[in-house]
Image (cartoon, coloured by chain):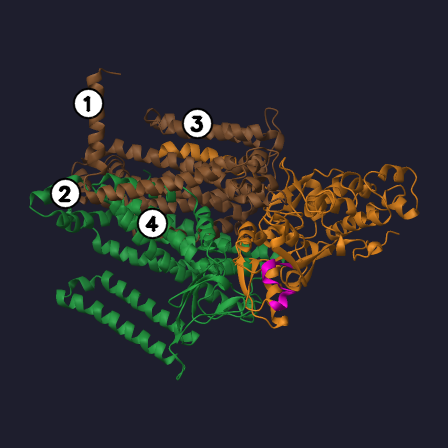
Chain colours: A green, B brown, C orange
Amino acid sequence: MFLKSQKARNIGLQLAFVGLIVAVIVTAIFEAQSNFAQQGIGLTSDFIWKTTGWEMSFSILPTDRTDPYWWYLLVGLANTLFLAVIGLAGATIFGGLVGLALIAPNRPLNLIGTIYVEIFRNIPLILQIFFWYSLTTLLPSPRNAGALAGVFFTGRGIYLPGLNVAGWSIALFWVVIFATVMAFVWFMAAKRFRKLEPGQRRRIPVAIIAVGLALAAIVLFLGHPAGTPWLAIPEPQGLNIRGGYRIQPELYALAFAIAVAGGASVAEIFRGGFKAVGSGHAEAAYALGLSGWQTFSRVRFPLAMRAMLPSLSNQFVWLVKATTLGLIVGYTDLFAVVVSSITQSGQTFEFMAILMVAFILINFSLANVFNRINDAARLKGHQTRG
Amino acid sequence: MGTALENRVRREAFWRNLRQDYFASPAFSLITVISVGALLLLVWQVVNWGLFDATFSPDARQAECAAKGGACWSVIANRWRIILFGLYPFPEHWRSGLACLVVVVVVVLSCIPYFWTARRLSITWLVGYGTFYVLMKGGVLGLPLVREAQWGGLALTLFIFTTMAVIGMPLSIAFALMRNSRLYWISRPMGVIIDGVRALPNVSILFTFAVVLPFMMPDMLVGEKLYRVIAGFILFFAAYQAEIIRGGMQAVAGGQEEAAKALGLSYRHRISRIVLPQAFHSALPATINQFVMFFMETTLVSIIGFSDLMSSARTAFSSGEWTFAFIEVYVFIAVIYFVFVFSLSRYGAYLERRMAVGSR
Amino acid sequence: MRKFVLPSLALLSMAVAGQPALAAPGDTLQGVKERGVLNCTGGDGSNPGMAELDDQGNWQGIDIELCRALAAAIFGNPDAVDIVPISWAQRWPALQSGDVDVIVKSSGGTFSRDTELGFQFSNTYFLGTSNLLARADLGLESLADADGGSVCVLAASSQEKQISSYAERLGIELETITMGNQEELRSAFFSARCDVYIDFGAGTAITHLAADNYDDYVALPDVVALEPQVMIVRQGDDPWLDVVNWTLSAVLFAEQEGVSSENVDEMRDNPPTAEVAKLLGVTPGFGAPLGLEDDWAYNVIKHVGNYAEIYDRSLGEDSSYRMARGLNALWTDGGVLFPYVVD
């Protein structure tokens, strides 16, 4: 090595690395400026206020063709988050179940689990989405659909009796629910929370959830026009069914595809996590007289969880990004809005930047939560025995 | 094979195992029967559609196929070359096919433990790559020049994937070590870079590398679009893989590194002899998973105008004659993807078994 | 780590096969001539009749033929063109960054594309109307009857905007289903996910032909919108725009004067009129002002053909679509296309 002293070498290495990053960024900025000037392209932000002029096929918030771009982008973001939450929950459930089947001491279950994983992991997600979507369209059209307790199952979606409340309160309701979940996760992951009394440790999450639900209920109540029935029942009308809620096939086909395909990978990670736990741990636990369930829940699962966390956070972030495939089957997530906006307005760079920033925000929050859990659960040096 | 007695013993052992594994209790028997039944039903449906009611004649068109009611494999008979080779010049298709074969051979060779030394691996890869490149690009040895923009189909998919794996893998180890470094100004920026790359939708990264980067680089560095896109792939492969390796390192008990330190091993030896082998061991399933996902992620290049397998397949049925037969084409490429990826994951399972010796 | 450094370095050095990067506007024609090949937009395989692949993997379609015509005009060789496959969203940055020299990709001329992206347009080479296809069992007379129904639209296409403003004009409520993928959109329509399907130009007719049962669907009489398709070049690239425009005029003029790839040699040997003589380079002066050879138009017609031949091969009699010329006939046949005057 060119430097004898360890300290000087460390400082040199750090300087070199940071310098390299800065140099790359500075070069990029200067180059971009001169090139844009040469091409006569200016980066603007006026397009944000222009009206879009097209209809969104799916939105959980009210949209209209006269809305400006910024509103469409926001709604697209909401759609992405909505789908991501459903997809992640589904993938975790499927993955957990199939993962259990994979590590169960039972051949047929192993076999089913393996077949599931190999099929859904080895075929591109795009093709799987096509498949599930084409299944949903096999349901009858709205005009010849039969109702089942006020619920219609049609190729246009599933119609449910809905609450009779204004759109903004629905939106706010979801924001409150989301905030509650985030607060709950944050509390579970925060370091200082681990120092609390066990009694308090149980009370605080309960309190958070109770407050959140109460707030959500108040929001819904405020959005309800007085004197109208609380429930809106779907009724066939013309070419369609009006009233109540409709869950569009684009949504559930896509959410299901993401859950099924993601579940296969999650299951595989699950299995890998358990493999990483040497069988010695389990044997020791049995020898100490722990029951099978205790061994699983107190010894194997916590250890496996630690080995799983990084790959699991990888996987979750991946699944959030998989929502960008929604475009192919007509789910207008943020990416679909961005692609349409690029074509309609031509502001390629600006919209790409918006897309990237939005995803960085979403996924950094997700990764952050995972990193907290990871740090909290990390095996400390003196715990090397597990 | 053996004597009658041996055969009988073997037969009985088979039945006994079957009973124990699949029919141990009424509940298990039920699960077995139901799952096998469902599988058989599914297989029957597929076979019916794909074989018994299908049309195979290359001359058949929509009307003939519709009459038989099953799959219309005529589309494959007529368009398979487009699916496999994309926009590659028609008379030169043999080169593209040969190039695919070379990649497959190189990958298979590097999966054999005999080749697991630095020299053998690097020589195999260099020779394989050189051959592939010369075959695809031409311009020498009397082969007509084919620009990268015209590469397509399976060859392109394989090229992107293998390049990504070969350069991305060592890079990811470097990333993981840098992120775990004790030096704040190395670990922190690296963490931001890794998390940033992982957070971005893969589409937007590729789009940036293909379309935006030429505006942000000195002209001499811009290079061919294909290589920019591959660089984008390598970057986000390495970011993902670095996290997986880091996860593997976490599973290595901290005492081991301390013990190695106490024995006076240098950082390099601690990492390369103690930490990494174990990290790889526990990270293997996730790594294979990652390879599998990235193999299918190569379909994204179709969004920025490269005709990989997925988009050449789309091109193949996007003509007035064949629009009706898109399902058959998708099935065809699903099978191709499946074959590649399934062999990957089976190989992973074999590696796991091979490495599992220590942890029993 | 050292064992990996060498191979990757070797690869990297292969990769830096420097390419001319950004084109400065105003010298495209010069740049194309130096390169010896024209970079033109191709489809990404989903634009039947405009840009698609035949069974031998050759590009065909109206957009492609015009690219070939440009190459023939510049180099005298229609094959001196690189069809760069490009997705819809990539069109604009690809032209801005110089990846392609001209966009010929079923792109309509719109105000924002002209003014905000730093582009300029050629004359119209194809008039595309957006038409509707509906399920026959609904008994629709026109779109006005489809209140409350749903319509299938290709995402990121002009039809997205067109259908929503048209529905507003009719005062009906339509649910739009936008998908990013043409095949998926079609199969959604065929499986009754939507009541109506909107597409551009030949798209509805092609979709109608692709249906399992032709009579289950009817074409509605509505003309939702008209979109003039233009070739697009960078702003400030006037000499290049002249070449593009006059190449288009040449194929239209040839059709008007009855010059085709079959009789072009006879016509050159004894030109019927002074204008044809000028067009085919018999009398000098048609090439130099454009920076081309005098017989450039002869090469275009010899190798590619006049507009009628281009149309028939791609969409008309000799294609699998059999579309009538309609609006895209010459003004002499009741259409709206016309050449500039060759004098």
Type of the residue with mark 1: Val
Q: CA distance from mark 2 to mark 3?
A: 41 Å
Between tags 3 and 1, which lies in front?
Answer: 1
Rendered image: mark on residue B9: 1
Between tags 4 and 3, which lies in front?
Answer: 4
Outermost residue, bottom side? A227
Q: CA distance from mark 4 to mark 3?
A: 32 Å
Cβ atoms under marks 4 and 2 closer than 8 Å: no
Rendered image: mark on residue B105: 3
Q: Sequence order check: which comes first, mark 3 or mark 1?
A: 1
Q: CA distance from mark 3 to mark 1?
A: 41 Å
**In the rendered structure, the residue with mark 1 lies on which chain?**
B
Q: Is residue B214 visible?
A: yes
- Magenta segment boundaries in residue numbering: C132-145
Between tags 4 and 1, which lies in front?
Answer: 1
Cβ atoms under marks 1 and 2 closer than 8 Å: no
Residue at image mark 2? A281
In which quadrant is the C terminus of chain B drawn? top left
- In the picture provided, is B14 more to the left or to the right than A222? left
